[in-house]
Image (tube, rainbow, N blue to C red):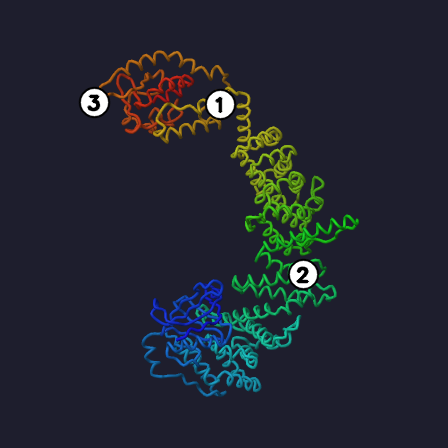
Amino acid sequence: MTDTRRRVKVYTLNEDRQWDDRGTGHVSSGYVERLKGMSLLVRAESDGSLLLESKINPNTAYQKQQDTLIVWSEAENYDLALSFQEKAGCDEIWEKICQVQGKDPSVDITQDLVDESEEERFDDMSSPGLELPSCELSRLEEIAELVASSLPSPLRREKLALALENEGYIKKLLELFHVCEDLENIEGLHHLYEIIKGIFLLNRTALFEVMFSEECIMDVIGCLEYDPALSQPRKHREFLTKTAKFKEVIPISDPELKQKIHQTYRVQYIQDMVLPTPSVFEENMLSTLHSFIFFNKVEIVGMLQEDEKFLTDLFAQLTDEATDEEKRQELVNFLKEFCAFSQTLQPQNRDAFFKTLSNMGILPALEVILGMDDTQVRSAATDIFSYLVEYNPSMVREFVMQEAQQNDDVSKKLTEQKITNKDILLINLIIEHMICDTDPELGGAVQLMGLLRTLVDPENMLATANKTEKTEFLGFFYKHCMHVLTAPLLANTTEEKPSKDDFQTAQLLALVLELLTFCVEHHTYHIKNYIINKDILRRVLVLMASKHAFLALCALRFKRKIIGLKDEFYNRYIMKSFLFEPVVKAFLNNGSRYNLMNSAIIEMFEFIRVEDIKSLTAHVIENYWKALEDVDYVQTFKGLKLRFEQQRERQDNPKLDSMRSILRNHRYRRDARTLEDEEEMWFNTDEDDMEDGEAVVSPSDKTKNDDDIMDPISKFMERKKLKESEEKEVLLKTNLSGRQSPSFKLSLSSGTKTSLTSQSPATSLPGSPGSPGSPGSPGSPGSVPKSTSQTAAITTKGGLVGLVDYPDDDEDDDEDEDKEDTLPLSKKAKFES
């Protein structure tokens, strides 16, 4: 059997009952050894990869729809479709499928959809087909009952659909509809409504093609006007023929395309407006109707996209100054609907669609349209622009940068001729429309702000080997556009209070601040340079005096985002300009009210305290402490004062800092491999405590002079010689279990000198509450390291505690002892434990 190769698109049905495009390729049929049977194969036209390999199962129900579609299910929730470019290719593959299954190629479905019980199946086997009553007025009720009774059973639905197809029954029913309307037979019209609704639920493409044909579709809609649940019939046909007008803004020469557009509009109207909302059990019964509309839209977009003359005329008329306003509005609305249709396309098709529009010059056309005075036209153009930005922001960024470069070149020439260049960049047009939005709720401004945010978001910017889009575009944006964005902010904050404080202005400034806050978070030196050079933060904080709380909070959020960066450039700018003053004023003016403003300001100062931003801490306390010292319902400001005092203490007592350095950096000599976690925790805790001014140094000890601090070391030096003599005596002892004894370092365990006792570790664990080295015991700053068999063995004899040394450490003993001379007594006792 020879293989046939035809161009097709492969679709799969997703969980949302939408068709996903899996690619375009060429289909063939042939025997596949691995699958042990004849199979359908689709290879991608781009690289020849295998898009589909599906065995033609003798029991699978294949359906042929609209002459160019073959649809089937390979699993319970896995539907496939092949959309052929040519009818001949579809017919040829359909013949192969029917040949494998032993079916006549004239049928549109190869198998009965059998899901019911064995009993139903046995009953239906006895009757080869379903016999329909004769199509007469007197039997309409009987027909309606037959249709209703067939819907619950898949097999009976299939037989009913075949009977309706074979006998041309639908056209006969529609003839009866005209008779009933002429006779005003309301009962008969109600029966016809139930019959036509039931036919829709049969979910059969062949029936839809008859019902949606040019000669039948309006009569089908007429039948659906007479819902028995309504006292008066609906007037759907009147709306479609008189109210809804088809405007051919650019003449369409292809009659097939024109007919397809009419059909799709009417079928979409039936789905959205005419048919009642399907119940949970009926939802899947209309899946073929969804597919019918979907493939129609794909076909319409494809046919328009391929018609270059049509698109050329469209964009030419859009940008032609001679085009009247009404005509231009129709053209823009058509383009908007065209782009909306494209949203049903799969990613590959949508890429080709927008690439075509880009090549035709859609962005320059939009720039012309946005510069017009007509509000409706600008609104439609904004919607089109949003489709482009959401699809490919890089394409829009590239256009505006090229446009800026061209404008710069033109401006240089005009400057030489002393002429001003009045051209406005596309992105600045967008900003101006956002600022000048006349809607009291600023709906359009919110949409445009979202588009600008997408354009300046570094997350969707590309980086290539030759250039970085982020660097180039942000440089362009801050040079050409940022002054336009901040213009309303700067104009409204020239005094100590906002010059205009109405609700619409406050909403607009809140949008501008939201975008600036986004820039602070995601841009680096560009926004920093702009804020500092233009003194933006000071102008923003003027808005803290606004009567609109949401705007004041936006200004505070902007400053909080800057402080959150912990950037000393920003911090110096804040301190130099005294930019905490508006915040403190707002805090004091808020009084004792417990609201969002109160919490947000306290949170900002708490962040400064917790993160220990020293420069800001000192600035706040030195300049605003008197205003804040009485705030005692939170400890934030007192905590800031404590941080400030600790900083001052460290500055005034450099020897204290030196002492802390000794305590922080010194370690008792131990094998580095066996330094235990508890000892590490002790050092870290000790350092933090000393810096925080908590447990290690009591408040009364802070005023001690340097002599008092160094006194324990002097006392310790007096005991140095006694300790060394006793160590020498013990080091002479050998003979441990017949082998050479390891050397020992010993220290006196007298209670007057250390906190150690002669208890064994088993009876007093280092971490227990009552142990000498536990965190909870007085006079001990940390816990005693645990002794293990791998590190050191502690022995108790005659009040002496020995710590095992390793043989390779002997040569470093002298060095260790020299280092120990610098330690205070309390620290030494800790180490010797």
Residue type at the position of mark 3: Ser
Above-or-below relation of 798 to 42:
above
Circle 3 residue: 737
**Residue 336 drawn at (x, y percent):** 62, 64
Can see residue 352? yes
Can see residue 153? no
Instruction: Label 2, secondary structure: give it.
Output: helix
Residue at 40% from the left image edge and 28% from the top image edge: 682
The quadrant of the rendering that contains the C terminus is top left
Judge the density around disc 3: few (<14), some (14-19), many (≥20) Cα neighbours within 10 Å.
few
Q: Residue furthest front?
A: 2
Above-or-below relation of 724 to 202:
above
Above-or-below relation of 780 to 616:
above
Instruction: Label 1, secondary structure: give it.
Output: helix
Q: Earlier in the sequence, mark 3 or mark 2?
A: 2
**Residue 557 drawn at (x, y percent):** 59, 43
The residues tagged by marks 3 and 1 sit, at their Cα atoms, a distance apart of 53 Å
Q: Which of 670 and 286 lies nearest the eye of the viewer?
A: 670
Residue type at the position of mark 2: Ala
The quadrant of the rendering that contains the N terminus is bottom left
Circle 1 residue: 699
Q: Which of 285 and 469 lies nearest the eye of the viewer?
A: 469
**Residue 315 drawn at (x, y percent):** 67, 65
Q: Which of 575 and 307 lies nearest the eye of the viewer?
A: 307
Q: Quadrant of residue 560?
A: top right
Decide if residue 756 is on the left or right side of residue 357: left
